[in-house]
Amino acid sequence: MQKERRVEIQWLRAIAACEVVACHSGLLTKHFTSTVQMPAWYAPLSAIGVELFFIVSGYVICMRVGASDGARPFLVSRILRLYPMYWIFTSVAVLAYLLNATWHLNNFTFALVPMAKSYLILPQTGFPILGVGWTLEHEMVFYFFVAVMLLTLGGGSRAKLFLAWLLAGLGAVGVVIGAPPYPLIAGAPGAESNALLSHVFSPFMFAFGLGWLVRVLEDRRTSSQPWLDALPFLLLAAGALWLAPEGGQVPLQRISVAAIVFAGFLACRGRFTDTPLNRLIWQLGDASFSIYLSHWFVLSAGGKLMGRLGPPYWLDLPVRIVGIGVSIAFGLAIFLLIEKPLDRKLRRRPSTLPVGNAVPSAP
């Protein structure tokens, strides 16, 4: 299977992680001011880095999966990729609770079932212990469908195309029935009683499917009818928009905006040269997972410190900018000091970055 070194994918991963950090930067300032708000145009797009992450994930996983790959090795590789760092930060969240029970942990209790679901990244109605881990629950559902494809149909071109259509179908059902794309607090009005079904029929499946489909179409360049390959996906998206209840179009609209950003960077493929900026972005792209997992701790701790210091309200924006920078730098340090060595050890990777072509690690 051909492997590629894709700087534009690293840009997308870095942008997605940094956008999520920026979205949560209010944690820094909520204790001393609420007067400075995000621009009105940005409010509907807040945390759109999540949708971008999912599209990139669909694309990269499709790029990594070969026709001869098996379901078990695929799932093992994904577990080794996600679980160790996620366990570390989940345990840090539990330790924080033990040190000070007043620190908010998404209604966390020491009940066996919710703790087990959090550590195993199983679908839940509400948030897991590590709040940002809710997105990984959707990732694991996506990986499950990839594994089922490999187990039943294999990893050939036609099987991959069918999976893209299936993911679109699942997303369409979620949009039409109004399944909440984001977790609701367990027991709240409107919360899904069946957490697994709410994840399977999630509008986010459209995002995974879109990235997956784009890569499939790239691999099927020799197809005489590429639009025919994409037609079922497009029809399902159009039907979901048509049948969606009031407000139900929002998830698809957000995914569409993320898709435009994604397509723009793919269109610039080949224009990214070996420059210091692109080398930095490559590092940030690799560190995007550590940035994503760690930023809440940095911003929350910084916010508590700002609350004690009581700076004037007009420092809202400077504090946010500094806090975002510190969060990104901290995540990069975590990647270099913990994630990268741990990942290398678990996968028995070489000690240096390949000089030739290589697929970037999945989001």
Image (cartoon, rainbow, N blue to C red):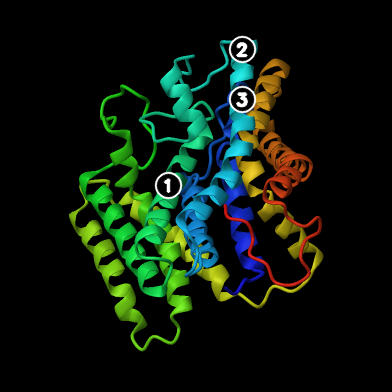
State which quarter of the image contains the N terminus. Answer: bottom right
Q: Residue at x 33, y 80 (%)?
A: 227
Residue tagged 1 = 44
Q: Residue at x 42, y 72 (%)?
A: 156
Q: Residue at x 28, y 32 (%)?
A: 192
Is 88 situated left or right of 129 in this image? Answer: right
Q: Is residue 318 above or below residue 340?
A: above
**Mark nearer the viewer, 1 or 2:** 2
Residue tagged 3 = 91
CA–CA distance in space, label 1 to label 3: 32 Å
Residue tagged 2 = 98
Is 242 situated left or right of 32 in this image? Answer: left
Which circle's residue, 3 or 2, is located before the other in the chain? 3
Answer whether labels 1 and 2 touch (C-beta < 8 Å). Answer: no
The answer to which of 328 and 153 lies nearer the viewer is 153
Is 243 situated left or right of 40 in this image? Answer: left
Other-residue count near label 3 (Cα within 10 Å), few / some / many at <14 / 14–19 / ≥20: some
Which amino acid, mark 2? Leu
Which amino acid, mark 1? Pro
Q: Is residue 77 above or below residue 127?
A: below
**Mark nearer the viewer, 1 or 3:** 3
Q: Is residue 253 visible?
A: no
